[in-house]
Amino acid sequence: LGMDTIMKGEVEVNRLVKLKAEMRGKLIEEAREAIVQLWEETNASQATRDAFRGLDCTDEASYTDELLQEHDEEIEVLRARLETMRPMLKMIERREEVVAERLKYEELQKDPDRLKQRGGALTKQLMMEEKMQKRIKKDLPKYNDTLRKRLREWKAEAGEDFMYKGEPYALTMERQEAEWASYKDEEAQKKLQKKQQEKARYSGAGQKLNLPGKGKQKTRRTSKPLGANNHIK
């Protein structure tokens, strides 16, 4: 082969090596974006994220095929984990909707003006509240019981808590129920205080009606009714 042919071959090899490096860098960056997205979807803890060492390499010149393979393997692991989690995540999301609806329903009951609507608007309002009440009384206890069981099973099998928005969801449920009980207690106290205040106000108004000098009536002597046995002297 002539020198000219050899030199052209070397140029082409260098071009392909550079192109491969550029493509490898692009593929690794895309893989990292996918990994971060999957971490969010699987509610991965910080410890889980830190365990993946592939992100430690930030120098693109040091990117290798082995590093790309490491990213691809992490993606496969996370995708498989997400598929396992999906049924639980769907139930958690449904429960969260009813938990939010529970507070909305309680606030609705404080607004008497909602019942001043007429015709179809009032019917629609009452039907909506009836459906809300049904979900709160029927569906929420069912979600609570099922999730508590499945969360225990998950921890036993996976060796870790099921995380949701950065917190073990079992703890989230406990906190929500404790906050709800506290809310109901506060509302009961407010109603009691309001009732006592109204009672005191009515009592005070009643006392003001008993004006001085008019509270007692003088005793009047009355004659015997007609037909009584009166002796005339």
Image (cartoon, rainbow, N blue to C red):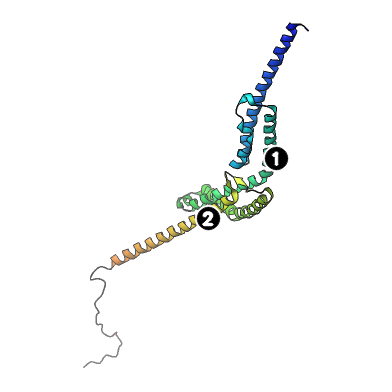
Q: Does residue 209 appear left or right of residue 73 in this picture?
A: left
* Kind of element beneath mark 1: helix
- Decide which of tag 2 and tag 1 comes sooner along the chain: 1
In the image, 21 versus 3, the foreground residue is: 3
Q: Quadrant location of residue 49?
A: top right
Tell me the residue at 61%/55% (across/down): 141
Residue 80, above or below 191: above
Residue 143 in the image: x percent, y percent? 62, 52
Residue 152 in the image: x percent, y percent? 65, 53
* Kind of element beneath mark 2: helix
Residue 9, above or below 64: above
Which residue is denoted by mark 2 in the rendering?
178
Instruction: Confirm whether residue 169 shows in the render.
Output: yes
- Disc 1 marks a residue whose amino acid type is Ala
Q: Quadrant of the image for the N terminus?
A: top right
In the image, 85 versus 72, the foreground residue is: 72
In the image, 84 versus 115, the foreground residue is: 84
Q: Quadrant location of residue 201?
A: bottom left
Instruction: Confirm whether residue 128 shows in the render.
Output: no
Q: Does residue 219 appear left or right of residue 176 in this picture?
A: left
Which residue is denoted by mark 1 in the rendering?
80
Outermost residue on the left side: it is 233
Q: Quadrant of the image for the C terminus?
A: bottom left
Tell me the residue at 74%/6% (across/down): 3
Q: Does residue 149 appear left or right of residue 166 in this picture?
A: right
Res 34 label = none
Q: Quadrant location of residue 57?
A: top right
Residue 195 in the image: x percent, y percent? 41, 61
In the image, 45 versus 141, the foreground residue is: 45
Residue 177, above or below 224: above
